[in-house]
Amino acid sequence: MRHREIERPGIARRGARMLRRLRAALGIDWYSFEDKVVLITGGSRGLGLALARTLGRAGARVVILARDPDELARAREDLRSRGVHITSHVCDVRDRAQVDTVLRTVTEELGGIDVLINNAGTLVVGPVETMTLEDFEDSLRTNLMGALYTTMAVLPQMRKRGEGRIVNISSLGGKIAAPHLLPYTAGKFALTGLSRGLRAELLKDNIVVTTVCPGLLRTGSPYNAFFKGRHRDEFTWFLLADSLPLLSMSARRAARKILWATRLGRAEVTLGVLAKIGAVLNGVLPGFGADLHAIVNAYLPEPDGIGTRRARGRDSQTRLSSSFLTILSQRAARDLNQLHESGQLGTARSSDLPGGASKSGAGQSGAGQSGMSQSGTDQSGTGQSGAGSEKQRGSSSTPKKPTR
């Protein structure tokens, strides 16, 4: 035993030296966020907000983009109260002109963008029978093209500077095609491919691209996602899976792991033990994985209910989705700026829903009309579709000290 204990440090030191040599050969060094300008798309809530908080503690100058000016204002005040040097801008990443304008403004004001985190995304849940071409197009515009627009905008300055970091937040859904998430998986598969290809081509310029594929995260995002068909049933199963500790990871822990992978310049990181197991099994036994998903699909809600129309998660609640079983997601939603109006976490009533939709409980069999939003969703910033490129300035001087 003593002999082994003596040997381990030596093995660890040799391993560390080999890793340093390999990283030096690839031109990848330990990366410090101190005084770096880090731009986060979809940064006003959820994982984006958790990343902004963590980066602020690391000494970064954080810039967050989102479409909803009210969400941005709340996020900015939250970050300033924590001592984060924060600037925010209204921007719809699906609009290339807006992206170019905002990134040009950020570069002029802060001297350049050192790290780009493409976190903006959109999620629609339901059977394929309820999906439209517009759902797929919106997913590709947000999950893929939004990341491509920002990446192409920052590449010239990163090349000129001879250094840069790009982090693309994809998903386990960008590796495994899960049922009832087809537009989302199409967009995330495309983003994963883009990110891996960029990694290979940009490393020669000392621009390190990291692909992040999280499993289920407790960010509260289901409340702002869109659901179709039997939207209450869809929301309930999705939120339950999103809430269980053994199946999901907290946003704060995910943010720490993402920043750690970025510091190390890792090519790809999958978050969550079950997500890692699923990715490995799907790679080794793809046929088995496909058959397993077909079995799971047989137990998911039918494509009736509200059909192809969309309902927000917060307008699709049931007694089960509002119970103690989802308490972790409820806390995450409040903490991460997903919900801000009083009573939004209660079971939805007909008077709570746009258009006076009727409520059918967890065992919804079809009717249950709910007001449908036609704009983009989730981490693309939520809010007015095609919001203008007006700027919301954050703290550009010494930030307020944290109160706790």
Image (cartoon, rainbow, N blue to C red):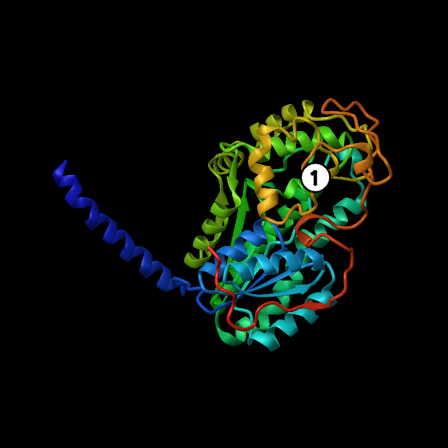
Circle 1: residue type = Gly
- Classify residue 87 as left or right of residue 312: left
Residue drawn at point x = 65 percent, y = 30 percent: 321
Q: Is residue 382 above or below residue 60?
A: above
Q: What residue appears at the point 65 percent right and 26 percent down from the top-left corner?
A: 320
Reply above or below: 168 against 129: below
**How far from the left and from the top, in percent, is residue 122?**
69, 48
Q: Position of residue 157 (x, y in %)?
A: 56, 74
Q: Is residue 339 above or below residue 391?
A: above
Tell me the element at label 1.
loop
The residue under the point 66% across, 51% down is: 379
Q: Which residue is mark 1?
A: 343
Q: Would residue 198 be visible to someone looking at this image?
A: no
Residue 250 horizontal/vertical position (percent): 51, 42
Observer-nearest of 17 and 109: 109
In this picture, residue 170 sits left or right of residue 362: left
As drawn, the residue found furthest toward the right would be 355
